[in-house]
Image (tube, rainbow, N blue to C red):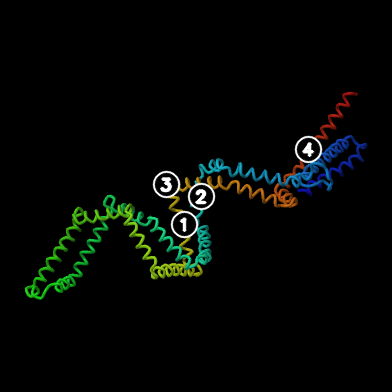
Amino acid sequence: MRLSATALLILMFVIFIVASAKSHEHWAWRYVRAFAEAAMVGGLADWFAVTAIFRRPFGLPIPHTAIIARSKDRIAETVGNFVADNLLAPANVAIRLQHQDITAALARQITEPAQARRLADSVVKAIPAVLDTFDEAVITDFLRKQSAALAADGRASSGAGALLDILTEQGRHQPLVEAALEEAWRALAANETVIRAKVRDKTSFLWRLISVDSKAADAMIGALDSLLRDAIADPQHPARQKITSMLEQLAEDLRSSPDMRAKVERLTEDMLAHPAVGDFLSGAWGGLKDALRAQALNSNSNLQGVVAGAFIRMGEDLLEDDIAREALNVRLRLLCTALAERHGRDVSLLATETIKSWDAQTIVSKLEQNVGRDLQYIRISGTIIGGLVGLVIHTAGYWLNFAAR
């Protein structure tokens, strides 16, 4: 475009020379000369203006030229402030995101098989590097400390108490109690011979002679069998109510009893101090790490397909669930707005410092690459418009002279 604008200016100069030589031959050449003369003036003026933005024309120290090179730091500050005040202002970000369904856009992306496959490939390739950053001894020690901390500050006992409250609320624990009772009834039937043998061993020789041990065992087994059957069949059985009361009291003690919390803490400390627990944690983490690494490095593994399928299913579920999607949208909008508020100035400072770090030639080159083409169009337009204006002025002058005569 620079060559085109310059070529047009040279063309006007050639036309001006030719028209000046032939102006005495015919009156029309005078109009051509006026057009070319004004076009040269317009073209040269716009060339000077465009050049002065980026550099000094002919290298001469003309005032108010090489504007961008001299104003680099001011431009950097202006760009940074513009980014902070307009693009990343929290209020503006909130307005722009207000009606944006961010979650749906993300969900549509990850439901595309090719995109899901690319994401899965990135995740799987990153697994070995991520795993290598975690040392087994460090992880084991971390798990020990976290477990000890949970017990020490009462979170473990409080959490267990809250869980029991949830289970016992509105009888949600009854299916578990019923299952436990059924298991106890089956255990009683399976161990009947053992129970009879234990009763016989505890009975003296004389009582065994008159079969008291057998009758006692029958009575005890029968009573237990009847109790378990009745408790299984009747949700309001006293035995079930007793179990419920015990669970409720245990939940209360776990939440508020210092003695119970101390017992949980001691139990946890004793358990974590045992070498077998450390071996278990280390072995579990090592086994998991080795299995994940092997799957990630195996080209025939289906791990990538599993991860891609998970992405696709998650995206499809989000697209179908309007409530979940809107809930995520609300949180994402708040997150983006909070990030803009917290780091908007940091981003603008990054833009400012980056531009300031460029030398004058770099910033001139980057701006010329982006707006230089349009500026050369201005030179072309200035040349043509200048010529037309010159033609109008020449014509007006001719008719004014004609009228004066």
Residue placed farthest to the left in the image?
210
Question: Which element is circle 2 on?
Answer: helix
- The answer for how far apart the CA atoms under marks 4 and 3 are is 61 Å
- The answer for how far apart the CA atoms under marks 3 and 2 are is 15 Å
Question: Which element is circle 3 on?
Answer: helix
Q: In what quadrant of the picture does the C terminus appear?
A: top right
Amino acid type for the residue under numbered disc 2: Ala
Amino acid type for the residue under numbered disc 4: Ile
Depth check, front residue: 81 or 249 = 249
Residue on which disc 3 sits = 323
Label located before the other in sequence (1 or 2):
2
Q: Is residue 322 above or below residue 188?
A: above
- Local crowd size for mark 3, using a 10 Å CA cut-off: few (<14), some (14–19), many (≥20): few
Residue on which disc 1 sits = 312
Give the x, y percent position of residue 167: 30, 54
Amino acid type for the residue under numbered disc 3: Ile
- The answer for how far apart the CA atoms under marks 1 and 3 are is 19 Å
Q: Nearer the viewer, mark 4 or mark 3?
A: 3
Residue on which disc 4 sits = 385
Give the x, y percent position of residue 300: 49, 70
Depth check, front residue: 247 or 33 = 247
- Local crowd size for mark 2, using a 10 Å CA cut-off: few (<14), some (14–19), many (≥20): few
Residue 142 is marked as: none
* Residue depicted at 70% across the width and 45% down the height: 75
**Is residue 20 at least partly visible in the picture?**
yes
